[in-house]
Amino acid sequence: MALIQTNPKRRRYGVAAIAGVLGGIVSAIVKFGWEVPLPPRTPERNATNPPQELLQQLGLPESVTHMSYTFNGNEGLPWVSFIVHFAFSIAFAVIYCVLAERFPQIKLWQGAAFGIFVYVAFHVVLMPLMGTVPAPWNQPFAEHFSEFFGHIIWLWVIEVFRRDMRNRITHEPDAEFPLESRTN
């Protein structure tokens, strides 16, 4: 099956990148919020969370990966993990938004399909293969539940930002739609 591509003259990659950065920041915050009522890991597994473990696998010492700060009486907030969390979110939001300019299929289910793809790629395949997290069958169901639906919500927020920012900045519909359907 050939991928449908938009007209190159209608693509707005700069706007897509801006939307990706902003959507990546906000969606990272939303994903944090999702994990408050539905924490993906047990307290024991979260003692060294996946971003910390990945950085340690790359050679950073635990004394760096576990650096934390205190805010409003809450101790042990892992700022190094937060940087990785935001960087991952921004990077994938920019990738998604830029790809959406050329390949509209990526927006399937308002981005939910891409969110599921990222969840499977990282939490089911890559991180287990790298030894960052246990094999999928050794992870609790609650972890899969939280991460699966968390990634759907995360990408949906990115899509909401992408669509709104693109339409507001360009005063045009997405590149695959005729200009006659313009939003004024």
Image (cartoon, rainbow, N blue to C red):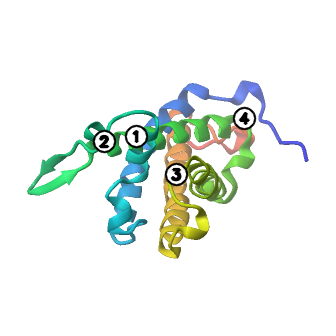
Amino acid carrying label 3: it is Val
What residue is rendered at 50% in x and 33% in y? Answer: 169
Mark 4: which secondary structure? helix
Label ID, residue 160: 3
Q: Earlier in the sequence, mark 2 or mark 3?
A: 2
Q: Residues within 10 Å of mark 2 (few under 14, many from 20)?
A: few
126 relative position to 149: left or right:
right
Mark 1: which secondary structure? helix
Examine the image and state in which quarter residue 21 appears: top left
Check disc 4 and report the residue beneath it.
Answer: 102
Instruction: Looking at this view, name the residue that lies furthest to the bottom.
Output: 141
Q: Earlier in the sequence, mark 1 or mark 4?
A: 1
114 relative position to 139: left or right:
right
Check disc 2 and report the residue beneath it.
Answer: 62
Q: Earlier in the sequence, mark 1 or mark 3?
A: 1
Q: CA distance from mark 1 to mark 3?
A: 34 Å
Compared with 118, 14 (above or below) is above
Q: Earlier in the sequence, mark 4 or mark 3?
A: 4
Check disc 1 and report the residue beneath it.
Answer: 56
Mark 3: which secondary structure? helix
Q: CA distance from mark 4 to mark 3?
A: 17 Å
Examine the image and state in which quarter residue 84 appears: top left
Amino acid carrying label 1: it is Gln
Instruction: Looking at this view, name the residue that lies furthest to the right.
Output: 1
- Tags 2 and 1 in contact by the CB under 8 Å rule? yes
Q: CA distance from mark 2 to mark 4?
A: 41 Å
Tell which tag, 2 or 3, sits nearer the viewer.
2
What residue is rendered at 72% in x and 44% in y? Answer: 104
Q: Residues within 10 Å of mark 4 (few under 14, many from 20)?
A: many
